[in-house]
Each structure stands twice: as structure tokens, then as C-alpha cells.
Image: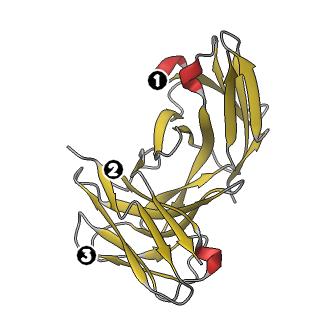
Amino acid sequence: AQSVTQLGSHVSVSEGALVLLRCNYSSSVPPYLFWYVQYPNQGLQLLLKYTSAATLVKGINGFEAEFKKSETSFHLTKPSAHMSDAAEYFCAVSRSGAGSYQLTFGKGTKLSVIP
Amino acid sequence: NAGVTQTPKFQVLKTGQSMTLQCAQDMNHNSMYWYRQDPGMGLRLIYYSASEGTTDKGEVPNGYNVSRLNKREFSLRLESAAPSQTSVYFCASGGTGTAITDTQYFGPGTRLTVL
């Protein structure tokens, strides 16, 4: 079964500091991985996704993630945190089902940005 | 282009009452999904529909029913609400449903409280 594990339910960083949110996957087949962001009281929106075309994936709002097969990881980074980055971040893996594909989400990491 | 819309935004029910959550998308997507979000649990798939006329169970289907009314609309029904169903419910739709890399687009959510 395919799954993802997010390390750290809460992460705090200072404004301007590096953001690093960790995601490790478990999969017996090549995984297709996603990062979604949820701002307070809103739905989820896609930050970026790994489709095997390139191991370094750039997303919206300056975020990027690197797929590392040897470490079974897909960590999300941003060089300099902004106050507007405060949100909850979810890693997810796509898996096949009856006639469709579904996402299995991690439990989420809430990012706080300290001024 | 409204994307994915959900009604109602908020609802309070008493134990044993029934209700239907409505979802509609205007992106001509084949696949639609219902999730519930609980603190510390991430998002868990309740039901999904790969195409008009088909529905399948997800990870946590007990206590719920769904109807794929047409390509645009996918409703979730609670026949006899229980306090354990207090949650935030998200509807999503996703592309053709035939690509493992399909992005899912989420609605704003319905906050349901069962007393």
C-alpha cells in the first residue's frame, strides 16, 4: 500500500528563514507525489507535484520539492519564509482505484511564521 | 469560472437527523471526491466517483451515501447523523480521472457539527 508520512505536526520559523517541511513515502511502485496548502478556513490548493519528469519540482509562491528515491523523500522547501506562508501543508501520494486515481494524504504540518 | 462549490458552508445537526451536502464543479472533470478532515488526521476519502453514474467507497464510507447526479454534481448524504461525524467535509474534482498525475481541485468545505 502506498502512504506518506509527514514529520512534525507543527513547524515554526522566523520570517526570512528557510522553510523545510518533511515528507517520506512508502511505495512499491514509482510514486506520484503532491504537496497541497490549506490557508485558514479555506480548501486545499496545489503547490506542486512530482510526475517523474524532473526530480526538482518548482511550485507556486517560491516553493520547491526534491524527489529523492534513495531516501524515499519529497521534502518541501522555501528559501525565505513570508508571513503569508503560515498555513497547513499536506503531502499526498496518488494511487490507482476502480476506474480512477485517488490521493492518500499525510496528516499535515502546520507552519507558523514568527515576525 | 467558479471551480468547485459546496453548500452549505456551516451546519449544525442533532444526533439522528439527516442532511445532504451538495457539491458542483464547472471544470468538466470526470472524477469527483468527498473527504473529511479531522484535526491531526489529514484528509480521508469517504467516497469517489470516477465518472457519471459510478461511485465507489473510499477509506471511511460507513454512515454515508453518495449520488453522482450528473457530470457536474456529486452529493453526500448523512442518513442518521452521529457526533463522530462532526468534521469539515471537502468535495474535490480532478481532471479526466485517467491520469495518475491528475490534480484535484477542492471546494471551500462544509463545517458540520453534530450535537
In the picture, the quarter occupied by the C terminus of chain B is bottom right
* Residue at 76% over, 37% down: A10
Let me know if residue A56 appears in the view. Answer: no
* Residue at 45% over, 40% down: A45
Task: Tell which of B100 and A113 is nearer to you.
Answer: A113
In the image, residue B47 sits, relative to residue A55, either above or below, namely below
Does A55 sit left or right of B22 as displayed? Answer: right
Does B28 sit left or right of B42 as displayed? Answer: left
Q: Position of residue A88 (x, y in %)?
A: 61, 39
Element carrying mark 1: helix
Let me know if residue B11 appears in the view. Answer: yes
Element carrying mark 2: loop
**Do the residues at discs 1 and 2 belong to one chain?**
no
Task: Tell which of A75 and A81 is nearer to you.
Answer: A81
Task: Tell which of B81 and B43 is nearer to you.
Answer: B81
**Do the residues at discs 2 and 3 belong to one chain?**
yes
Q: According to the image, label 1 marks what residue?
A: A60
Label 2 to label 3: alpha-carbon separation: 18 Å
**Residue count near mark 1 (Cα–Cα under 10 Å), binned few <14, some 14–19, many ≥20:** few
Q: Position of residue A52 (x, y in %)?
A: 54, 33
Q: According to the image, label 3 marks what residue?
A: B69
Q: According to the image, label 2 marks what residue?
A: B95
Q: Are marks 2 and 3 in contact (CB under 8 Å)?
A: no
In the image, residue B38 sits, relative to residue B67, either above or below, namely above
Label 1 to label 3: alpha-carbon separation: 34 Å
